[in-house]
Image (cartoon, grey):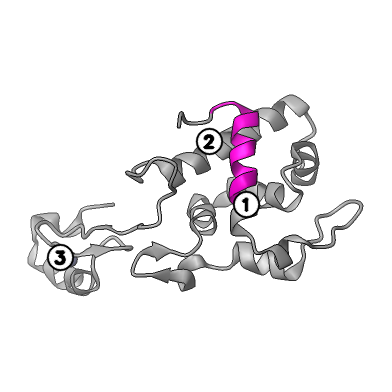
Amino acid sequence: MTHPSSLSALLAWYRAEVGATIPQRIHSRETAEDGDPEWHNAFRRWLTAHPSAEDRDGQLVSPLRFWLWRLGGSRAAYLRLLAYVDCDVTRAANLHGIASADVAHDYTRECLRRLYRLMYAESGVPNEPRRDVRRDCAEPGCPVRTTRLRCPQHEQGLTESARRGTPHAVEDS
Ligand SMILES: [Zn+2]
């Protein structure tokens, strides 16, 4: 699959992703007819809660939820809004405070591209989002894979090795 780059292609991808991920009972919600977004409580909880509870050995139950969380910030907030209004860009942009249609187009495309890159880059499997979010422990030579920067053992020993002045003790992520 070639990576989607147009807004319509990205929207089609996102719509499918949301449809496949969000439980139907949550997706069929009531919406406010005007003004502020009135999120269904279950939907809000499902999309915004910290996703680590669903993380088992680095295997994600819901990649979309995890990568939205990892994307973070106003882009993730906008994409959650977009999911909530069934990928209606005009409506989502209005709710997000974007007045210009051109800006809405560009912003939506940019947010979706970023999310797509997060979910699919390095997955190693075409058409499959990343489910294994573990990476090698940052401690040189350590074979343990972890969802954090360092495995629990080396995270614990970090303070001690920093005190000893180990060269890679203060390496950044
Ligand atoms: Zn380690």
Q: Which residue is mark 1?
A: 18
In the image, what residue occupies the spot 65% across and 45% down? 15
Q: Which residue is mark 3?
A: 162
How many numbered markers are drawn?
Answer: 3
Check the image and report above or below for 141 versus 109. Answer: below
In the image, what residue occupies the spot 62% across and 52% down? 18
Q: Could you tell which of marks 2 and 1 lies nearer the N-terminus?
A: 1
Q: Is residue 96 left or right of residue 12?
A: right
Q: Could you tell which of marks 2 and 3 lies nearer the N-terminus?
A: 2
Taken as a whole, is the magenta stretch helix, strand or loop?
helix
Category of crowding for the residue at label 1, using alpha-carbon neighbours closer than 10 angstroms: few (below 14), some (14–19), many (at least 20): some
| Image disc number at residue 113 | 2
- Find numbered disc 2 in the image and state the secondary structure of the residue it sits on: helix
Is 129 in the magenta? Answer: no
In the image, the residue with mark 1 has its CB under 8 Å from the nearest atom of ligand 1: no
Question: Residue 25, how many percent across, how many down?
Answer: 72, 67
In the image, what residue occupies the spot 8% across and 60% down? 166
Q: Quadrant of residue 169?
A: bottom left
Q: Quadrant of residue 97?
A: top right
- Separation of disc 2 and disc 3 at Cα? 39 Å
What is the span of residues highlighted in magenta in the rendered image? Answer: 5-17
